[in-house]
Amino acid sequence: MPQSVPSLPRRVARMLRTSLFAQVGVALVLGIVVGRLWPDTATTFQPLGDGFIRLIKTVISPLVFCVVVVGIAKAGNLKAFGRIGLKALIWFEVASTAALLIGLIAANVFGPGSGMNVDPSKLDTSAVDAKTAGGELPTTGEFILNALPQSAIGAFAENALLQVLVLACLTGAALLHLGHTKVPKILPAIEQAQEVIFAIVGFVMKLAPLAVFGAMVHLVGEYGLGVMKTYAKLIILCYAVAAVFLVLLSVALKLMTGLSLWKFVRYTRAEMLLALGTASSESVMPRMMQKLRQAGARDDAVGLVLPTGYSFNLDGASIYLSIGTLFIAQAVGVDLSLSQQITVILVLMLTSKGMAGIPGSAFLALSATASSLGAIPAGAVALLLGVDRIMDSMRVVTNLLGNCVAVFAVSKWEGALDTDRAKKMLDGEIQFVEEEDEPSEGESGEGGSSAPEGGSKAPQGAAGDADSSDAPVSTTKGAAIPAQPKAEAKEPAPEVG
């Protein structure tokens, strides 16, 4: 007998029950409607979004630490990890500079601030001071010094990702140096901690629709939709330039890896929508690490490139800063010469690297750029106060996609990408599996593999090379640390019920 087709209401109910993308999409629409109809409720619902981001931030540092340590141990080669870091920095610099140049050219061609004739002396700059909380961007020396941990506990407590990365690199190097015989229980413990953290991420992600609803009610209720009319030309230009930049990124990704950026967006559509709704790329970092690993990128490449990109590869912010600088100059009637615009690029290349985690960092970077030119009144930065929140969506998505493309590109460059698996995953031939839902070892079928087709463990590349050597290797999930003597390492095979 032919199987009965579920009715439309049942299919919709099932989709809403099982699809994070559908849940977040509905929450996004409801948030806009509630914020538009009842703007007075904006502050009431704001804690939903803020609370979700707080919960996610609690697991980011320990997750990055675990992934990087395990990645170094599995790769078995600290030099390879150093090469990944160097290639990532090269990619970041090229991509962010390209974003700055494209934004500057577009602002010159379309002139989003031309004809506004604003008198900067009449602008209220106190709101800018409140936005930046009296902070300032670190100098190059301070930025480098701040990347070094002063306290191991402090690095985790402050969610200082660069400091956590340094600690993780040192720990991974120490594990390789000592070998499995001296510290046989450390690596398995870190791997188990990583699985626990991924399970926590799975629990927190169930709250994502509530977070998006609260964030959208606050955005629409607090800022309204009228600001889009006032700054329509600037908003359209920034989003259009971001779209052009993403097209260029997709071409670069296709040439380097053969992968499709559009298919990757479809693969991560729920995470993209969540980042849009909460205006925070940090809210999806743990989930993106899962999806990149399952899409064939090696653990050490994912663990190093993605978190580092959050500080060094802010492509969306670069586009906004370059267009915003020229918008301010045009609005107050200042015509910047070619040499001054080159200065804008050079200054923003430095200031954009120290923006992550600093309140009002975009305004600090714009103020620093205006001060360095000496031609734009620093108070004119207040012109962008009304539109800055609307630009968050563009910045978040462009930053996030730019960093994910960097992971694939650098992984391919280093030989740490399983391209065949990546293509199958993006084509839907292999399904994404929540890592906390994996079957444990001994529960699987043929071959004793703990992950079914579409499981969450991506092939480890260099770890496979290490496994093929003559020396015995630990069987702890492919770790390339010298194993104990065989007599000690033997364990009875697990019984299958």
Image (cartoon, rainbow, N blue to C red):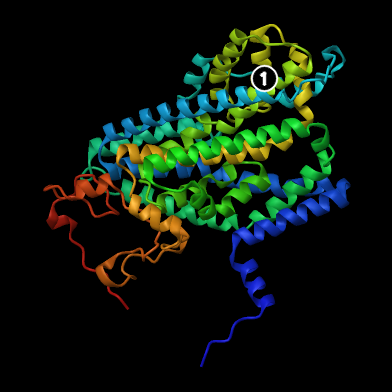
| Residue found at x 34% / y 54% | 420
Picture quarter containing residue 100? top right
Picture quarter containing residue 234? top right
User: How would you rate the neighbour count of disc 1 (Cα within 10 Å): few for under 14, some for 14-19, many for 20 or more?
Assistant: many
Count how many numbered circles sit on residues in the image.
1
Q: Which residue has dot 1 on it?
A: 366
| Residue found at x 63% / y 41% | 280
- In the rendered view, does 371 fall on the left or right side of 250? right
Name the foreground residue: 319 vs 475: 319
- Farthest residue to the bottom: give it: 1
- Which corner quadrant holds the C terminus? bottom left
- The image position of residue 47, as x and y in percent, is 74, 46
The amino acid on which the numbered mark 1 sits, given as a three-letter code, is Leu
- The image position of residue 1, as x and y in percent, is 51, 93
- The image position of residue 16, as x and y in percent, is 65, 67
- The image position of residue 288, as x and y in percent, is 50, 48
User: Would you place residue 453 above or below residue 481 in this image?
Assistant: below
- Farthest residue to the front: give it: 109
Is residue 193 shown to the viewer in this render?
no
Is residue 247 shown to the viewer in this render?
yes
Name the foreground residue: 489 vs 209: 209
Instruction: Give the secondary structure at mark 1.
Output: helix
